[in-house]
Image (spheres, rainbow, N blue to C red):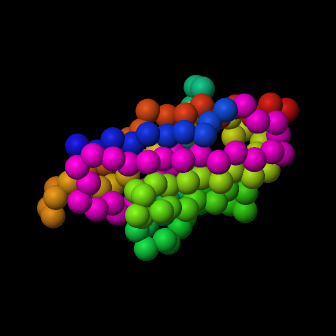
Amino acid sequence: QVQLVESGGGLVQAGGSLRLSCTASGNIFSINVMAWYRQAPGKQRELVATITSGGRTNYADSVKGRFTISRDNARSTAYLQMNSVKPEDTAVYYCSAEAYVNSYELADYWGQGTQVTVSS
């Protein structure tokens, strides 16, 4: 199995910055895509950003130009640099990884989430 642990959430003022980290551990053969999702109270979980093992990235329109996803493959870690945050960025942020535990078993794994609260 693969475990994902997020860190870096907290309270930040609007216009400020925050950096989230997500580290994968366990029986990892390789990791394809890592992603960040978020879920605000009363709303559905939404995709924030994705990054492939080769570094190709994709962002939700709402965070383009403000958030940057990156990853360190050697550390099985993904990051989300959040700049110019807005109150509407307040949510629980979840990390996910599409990972192989051997050469043929591919599955999606999720972290427990980290709270980000942006004050106005």
Can you say whether 62 is above or below 93 in the image?
A: below
In the displayed structure image, the side of residue 106 where residue 24 appears, left or right: right
Q: What x and y, as percent, mark residue 73?
A: 42, 64
Asked where in the image residue 33 lies, by quadrant, the reply is: bottom left
In the displayed structure image, the side of residue 108 where residue 94 appears, left or right: right
Asked where in the image residue 102 lies, by quadrant, the reply is: bottom left
Inspect this view and state whether residue 7 appears.
yes
The span shown in magenta is 11-37
Q: Residue at x 38, y 48 (%)?
A: 24
Inspect this view and state whether residue 62 appears.
no
- Total labels: the figure holds 0
Q: Which quarter of the figure is the C terminus placed in?
A: top right
Q: What x and y, as percent, mark residue 36?
A: 51, 49
Q: Residue at x 70, y 45 (%)?
A: 18
Residue farthest toward the front in the current orientation of the protein: 75
In the displayed structure image, the side of residue 65 where residue 14 appears, left or right: right
Q: What x and y, as percent, mark residue 60?
A: 60, 56
Q: What x and y, as percent, mark residue 37?
A: 51, 45
Give the camera-side residue of 25 and 55: 25
Q: Magenta: predominant secondary structure element?
A: strand
Q: Residue at x 72, y 31 (%)?
A: 11
In the displayed structure image, the side of residue 1 where residue 111 appears, left or right: right
In the rendered image, residue 79 lying in the magenta stretch gets the answer no
In the rendered image, residue 23 lying in the magenta stretch gets the answer yes
Can you say whether 61 is above or below 27 in the image?
A: below
Q: Residue at x 73, y 57 (%)?
A: 66
